Image (cartoon, rainbow, N blue to C red):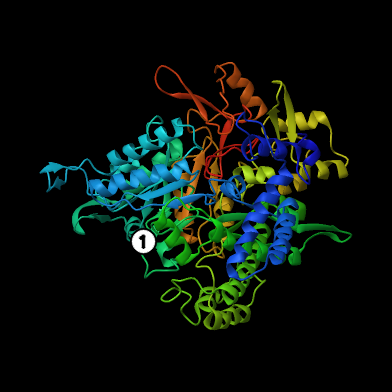
Amino acid sequence: MNLVEDKLNLSENAVKVLEKRYLKRDKDGNCVETPADMFRRVASTIASGDLKFGKTQQDVDVLTERFYKMITNRYFMPNSPTLMNAGRELGQLAACFVLPVEDSLEGIFETVKNTALIHKSGGGTGFSFSRLRPKNSVVRSTMGVSSGPVSFMEVFNAATEAVKQGGTRRGANMGILRVDHPDILDFINCKSDNNKLNNFNISVAVTDKFMEALKAGTDYDLVNPQNNTVVGRLSAKKVFDMIVDGAWRNGEPGIIYIDKMNADNPTPLIGQIESTNPCGEVPLLAYEACNLGSINLGMMVDETPEGNKINWQRLADTTRTAIRFLDNVIEVNNYPLPKISEMVRNNRKIGLGVMGWADMLMKMGLSYASEEGTKLGAQVMEFIDYESKCESIELSKERGRFNNFAGSVYDNKKFLTNKYRGKSAGIISDEQWADLDNQIEKFGIRNATTTCIAPTGTISMIASASGGIEPLFGLVFSRLIMDGTEMLEINPIFKDYMIKKGLYNEDLMKEIAKTGSVAHVNGISDEIKHIFVTAHDVSPYWHVKMQAAFQLHTDNAVSKTVNFEEHATRQDIEEAYILAYENNLKGITVYRNNSRQFQPMNLDSKKKEEENKVEEVEVVEEPVVEEVKEEYNPTGEIKKVTCPECGNTIEMAEGCFICLNCGYSGCS
């Protein structure tokens, strides 16, 4: 089968990624479908959901073509499980789930069992351990003492490891503990050893009360979740400093602002939000799931005689088609647990996000680190938010409102009007939001949430797009190819720009590859340096402001990494956390470059240094499923992590470690 001939609008690297991870294989591990076959399989399977609503097969065929063109034009990509599993025996299409952790041995191990079933199906899991009694609490039934939340996290971690060893797709976990839990200090330090809890991202659920105490310089209450009694007090500043120190040392823990998440909980009568998915962008109730997809913003820009312009009509059409696609995913999905199926169908949360944001900015000649850049980000997301609600209302007319609509935030005649009054980015007026409120009052809305900014990992590689709303990691970097030689990987928008300006040459590209950035390259104009910024050229202030610009019109949360240079101080990270809270972010992930021993750079100069120090790690490839391989030295320190798909190194971006060569990610 000649995959390259069937690549449609795909790059050769995208075809390689599809062949490696997504296409059907026979028992001998040989691909038995082309990329076109896969996209057709996905489009037809998702379109078949319309049959449940009285549509004919002819209607489904028309919708299949609409979905197929949207995906093959690279306007939109669903999350990886949908691409992998739609129309196949497993049929599990959701990326991540949240499970409850109850304060009993039976409840805990019931969740461990359910976690294994989810990981077996290819999903990730998020948990709040905040309901568990503190360590050394008396257990009445045995008169023994509890070992506390962190010890049970180790049980979940071991179970995840066992399922991974069984040869399934790597499972990722999010572990969350409220800042007012008595064991919070143990939790903050639980990943200070890089060899522990390696199957978990961890985040502290920070409350408004805690932030008020921090601002006032006072202590705050610790509350026993068994009986909601105050059992102690801690200095908010001391605890905050510990969180900052952990983030400075190795990027963990992250922070979620739990009260801000619950302020936007669309179904408060059904329950309080306690946790998120592993990458933090989807606050979910227990037994809810992520059904996600992303619009490729770079493909929403047209080249005209007057300059590059956003094609707003294409963006509107893509948004509406994508919302219909994601709602259909819920209908055809084979969920791993009946409780999940019930909860998902009752709330029908979907998350339409974006990728290719850095591409759009570069094409528009705007800097990521600028007021103009953040303003455009707010406008684009406002437009997507509005169009997504319009389509969800249309779906409600056809299919009915989500089951838990009564008592939801939408069961309020002026919800959108009140939410966005005076906050327009200049695209959608107060009158337009008011009109949607009137339609919702009359027809309802199909989905409790419609928008979310997720990491895009491998799907952005398939779409040849920059990841999520991140700036580029590098404009030029070295890529290891099949025979072990290296070649330069040059961002195509940057390359095209430099050619048009008559500035492109191989020596200059090699010079840029040393750091990946043009910021410190002699002979590059200020204009080029302004437009073509990379992650480490962007100050933490602009990272946070860009996340805030998208968060305002995002129902769920925004997954993004605030990248810091290696020399950044703890105070720098502290300021980013405070700025994030003041800008109404729902969470924040920071990463100081090289702060984990096993995180090598995939840039030319750094790689040459590492080659002299680190023995290459052997990568053993399974026919279908690959694992990240880690090498340890005698002290237990991780020396290097290599990508299981291409042998290049893994880097922190989009809230988790991904391969910037082929896009491999445990979060995608």
Q: Position of residue 512 (x, y in %)?
A: 73, 33
Q: Is residue 341 left or right of residue 40?
A: left
Residue beneath label 1, please? 208
Residue 54 vs 438, above or below: the answer is above
Give percent across and percent down for residue 356: 68, 51
In the image, 420 versus 18, the foreground residue is 18
Q: Which one is in front, 215 or 402? A: 402
Residue displayed at 32% across by 37% down: 155
* Residue 8 in the image, given as x and y percentages of width and height: 78, 45
Q: The N terminus is located in which quarter? A: top right
Q: Secondary structure at mark 1?
A: helix
Tell whether 220 sits left or right of 492.
left
Q: Residue at x 78, y 34 (%)?
A: 2
Callout 1: 10 Å neighbours few (<14), some, many (20+)? few
In depth, the one of 288 and 240 nearer the eye is 288
Residue under the image location 32 percent in, 49 percent down: 129
Q: Amino acid at mark 1?
A: Asp
The quarter holding residue 518 reads: top right
Q: Nearer the viewer, residue 284 or 183?
A: 284
